[in-house]
Amino acid sequence: MNFFRRVMLAAAALATLALSPRPAAAVDLTMYYPVAVGGPVTKIIDDMVARFQKENPDIKVTAVYAGNYTDTMTKAMTAMKGGQPPQLSVLLSTDVFTLMDENAIVPMDDLVADKAWFKEFYPAFMANGQINGKTWSIPFQRSTIVLYWNKDAFKEAGLDPARPPATWDEMIEMGKKLVKRDASGNVTRWGVSIPTTGYGYWMLQALAIENGQKLMNEAGNEVYLNSPKTVGALEYWVDLSRKHGVMPPGSIDWATLRTDFLEGRTAMMWHTTGNLTAVKDGAKFNFGVAILPAKERRGSPTGGGSFYVFKNASPEQQKAAVKFIQWMTAPERAAEWSIKTGYVAVSPAAYKTPAMEAYAKDFPAATVARDQLEYAVPELSVHENGRIYKFVNDAVQAAVTGSQKPSEALSSAQQQADRVLRAYK
């Protein structure tokens, strides 16, 4: 074949290629995702993302695992200020005021044609994300605090293994019987443990609401940290150790408490339902899960993360992000996520799926956190949330370590919070 003919054929081939329909380029989405509790969460998310992409080859989702919730929020804000924000992220449901103040997110109302979708979720999980008539987030990795108890330890202590404490007083009485000591008098098993690090504000809110006190207003510019009932809640928490001797003294680490429970070093623990599957898989003893005990009332704040869509994403990316969120929160996937992790499935429809009905029949503990939604309140969420959390967490630490009385610690936290929130009045 001579040179001229080769050139002509090559030109014809290029012309044909130019006229052929080309596959559309995939819409790229970066999603920042927190890994705050145990279990194979990253593997589960990777698998779900891969399945979504198989069904939607025109959308590519890259999950970036950014540490705990605080780390993830910091990295998302840093990326946004650096001009390269994610298009969507799972962040604490309570980060909403900060994200709004930073002009980082768009309301879902602007992206969704059928607003009836919002009503498919549990109202308790939507509460944190609905502000000023707009819906700013969609619940996904959601939780409440629950009581885990070691039924074998209860039986050994002469307690009914089928009956957890229903009140604060009962938790003390049962806790005293559950404390176990060796021949030298050293405690080898505590009665109860409530974590004081990491999410101290969350545990304090649970105790406060059980004592009849809410911690913030709906506008997100007031907190009630030094109210008598909030102080009473922290005093009860401190007394579990210092007065009643049923809880370890000093700080109790959020990250290691599950291991302490699984290894029999505490007979009861307060922790997120997001640890449920990890406890189920790791426990070598019979255990139960219960709604938190009451003082004036039952109660737990909701917790965990929700999906947010970032303002700097292109219209195509925002549309793709909503499609991904709708796929991830569909009843079948919400049920799957709950079964594999222990988080609460975010819609009533998820609990009516065959998979969840079968699982709950086999493992009734899977519905406890959902049932507690009847008594749940929105998690502490205000402007400058990160700073307010630090004030509360520091107060909890000061009280449990004995460096300040609960009233002093909470008064200091209130003064600091008032100074910060004054700008939002």
Image: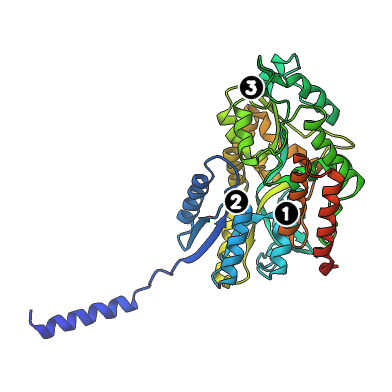
Q: Identify the residue under disc 1.
A: 390
Residue 100 seen: yes
Q: Nearer the viewer, mark 2 or mark 1?
A: 1
- Considering the numbered disc 3 on the image, is that residue within a helix, a strand or a loop? loop
Residue 200: percent from left, percent from top: 73, 45
Residue closest to the eye, 302 or 23: 302
Q: In which quarter of the image is residue 169?
A: top right
Residue 204: percent from left, percent from top: 78, 44
Check disc 2 and give the amino acid type: Asn
Q: Which of marks 3 and 1 is in front?
A: 1
Asked if residue 62 lies left or right of residue 284, the reply is left
Residue closest to the eye, 51 or 386: 386
In contact (CB < 8 Å): disc 2 and disc 3: no
Q: In which quarter of the image is residue 386?
A: bottom right
Alpha-carbon distance for marks 2 and 3? 30 Å
Residue 317: percent from left, percent from top: 55, 68
Q: Which residue lies furthest to the bottom in this view?
A: 4
- Considering the numbered disc 1 on the image, is that residue within a helix, a strand or a loop? helix
Residue closest to the eye, 48 or 270: 270
Q: Identify the residue under disc 2.
A: 68
Dot 2 crowding, Cα within 10 Å, few <14, some 14–19, many 20+: some
Check disc 3 and give the amino acid type: Asn
In which quadrant of the rendered image does the C terminus lie? Answer: bottom right
Residue 225 seen: no
Check disc 1 and give the amino acid type: Lys
Label 2 vs 1, first from the N-terminus: 2
Q: Identify the residue under disc 3.
A: 286
